[in-house]
Image: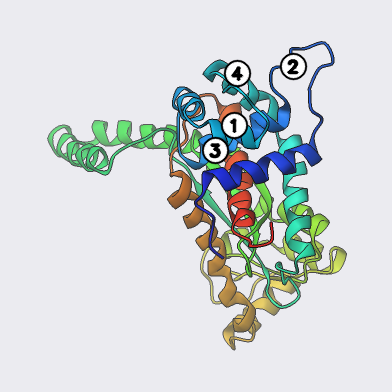
């Protein structure tokens, strides 16, 4: 499904959704210059166009028709937008926005989770912008230093790589394969196994829409994941049983042995071929909003990844003809 590239249309839709999701003001005795829905709409435009807070302020100041669409006569300054990000882009508030967007698509029968599965995948983001030329130069210099000074440089390079993995922002998603709508998202700082995210993502997605089949890659493979999904949640989980060391012996768990037999005869090919749509969603996120984060603190990086998931859904919804 194509995303809408019109910032003005996304601005209006974000404003209408935020009016349904949140109150006008966060405090009764605070200033009334801007409402929460107005500030959220401005943050959505900033994220769509990959702008800094100062550039977002200048863009809005030069676009009086856009401000009029959301009931503003002046643009919020960059400090106001920075504070609004910390206030609005929390997990609790953004989950409410995901609820409304899921209701919108479900009401138009676009999820089609009875015919096509829920697809899960994860991706990592860069902590800051790095050009491809800079990365190539770093690799060349690292190889040259390693050849010149031996193992000490290699050990320091490994330690540096380990630190980078511990600080790597990671986003896990569960999306409807039919329309690329994100139904649930989880964020972490630091790379690790995907398996612990499977059940929380599946529970959140099922709370927003009925899920019949869930597909994921082997990173989510776990016997408890299959047992809970199939026996408690009544969701058919299709994951290649390839976790752990390669072995010719059958897996120890009942459901993993069952899936190995089914994958051997390609019995789940009709559903599992939709797993690549989760990678398509990650590609759409990075292509439209970049693969690096602009926040510096871990908490705000988590919120920024959640905001991107919501903005992706708003761009999909803005592309609908009847919205």
Report x, y in % for residue 86: 64, 24
The quadrant the C terminus occupies is bottom right
In the drawing, what numbered circle is on residue 45? 3
Of the numbered discs 4 and 1, the one sitting upstream in the chain is 1
Q: Is residue 176 visible?
A: yes
Dots 2, 1 in contact, CB < 8 A:
no
Residue at image x 62%, y 33%? 68
The secondary element bearing badge 1 is classed as: helix
Dot 2 crowding, Cα within 10 Å, few <14, some 14–19, many 20+: few
Horizontal placement of 90 versus 63: left or right? Answer: right
> What's the distance in space between the residues labelled 3 and 2, CA to CA?
22 Å
The quadrant where residue 23 appears: top right
Which of pointers 2 and 1 indicates the residue nearer the eye? 1
Disc 1 designates what residue?
67
In the drawing, what numbered circle is on residue 80? 4
> What's the distance in space between the residues labelled 2 and 1, CA to CA?
16 Å
The secondary element bearing badge 2 is classed as: loop
The quadrant where residue 236 appears: bottom right
Whether residue 115 is situated above or below residue 303 in the rendered picture: below
Report x, y in % for residue 214: 70, 67
The secondary element bearing badge 3 is classed as: helix
> What's the distance in space between the residues labelled 4 and 2, CA to CA?
12 Å
Disc 2 designates what residue?
32
> What's the distance in space between the residues labelled 4 and 1, CA to CA?
15 Å
Report x, y in % for residue 317: 64, 55
| 261, 181: nearer the viewer | 181
Of the numbered discs 3 and 4, the one sitting upstream in the chain is 3
């Amino acid at each position: 499904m194509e995303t809408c590239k019109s910032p003005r249309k996304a601005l209006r839709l974000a404003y209408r959704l935020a009016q349904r999701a949140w109150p006008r003001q966060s405090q009764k005795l605070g200033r009334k210059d801007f409402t929460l829905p107005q500030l959220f709409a401005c943050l959505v435009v900033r994220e769509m166009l990959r702008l800094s807070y100062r550039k977002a302020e200048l863009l809005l100041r030069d676009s009086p028709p856009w401000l009029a669409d959301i009931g503003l006569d002046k643009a919020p300054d960059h400090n106001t937008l920075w504070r609004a990000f910390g206030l609005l882009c929390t997990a609790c508030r953004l989950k409410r926005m995901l609820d409304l967007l899921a209701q919108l698509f479900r009401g138009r029968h676009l999820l089609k989770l009875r015919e096509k599965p829920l697809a899960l995948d994860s991706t990592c983001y860069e902590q800051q912008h790095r050009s491809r030329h800079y990365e190539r130069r770093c690799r060349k210099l690292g190889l040259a230093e390693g050849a010149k000074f031996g193992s000490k440089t290699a050990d320091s390079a490994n330690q540096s790589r380990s630190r980078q993995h511990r600080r790597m922002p990671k986003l896990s998603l569960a999306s409807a394969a039919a329309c690329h709508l994100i139904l649930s998202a989880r964020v972490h700082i630091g790379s690790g196994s995907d398996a612990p995210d499977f059940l929380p993502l599946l529970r959140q997605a099922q709370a927003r829409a009925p899920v019949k089949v869930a597909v994921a890659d082997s990173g989510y493979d776990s016997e408890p994941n299959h047992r809970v999904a199939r026996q408690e949640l009544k969701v058919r989980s299709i994951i290649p049983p390839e976790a752990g060391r390669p072995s010719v012996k059958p897996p120890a768990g009942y459901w993993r042995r069952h899936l190995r037999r089914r994958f051997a005869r390609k019995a789940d090919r009709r559903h599992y071929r939709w797993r690549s749509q989760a990678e398509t969603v990650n590609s759409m996120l990075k292509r439209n909003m970049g693969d690096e984060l602009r926040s510096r603190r871990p908490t705000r990086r988590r919120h920024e990844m959640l905001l991107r998931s919501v903005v992706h859904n708003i761009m999909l919804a803005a592309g609908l003809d009847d919205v």
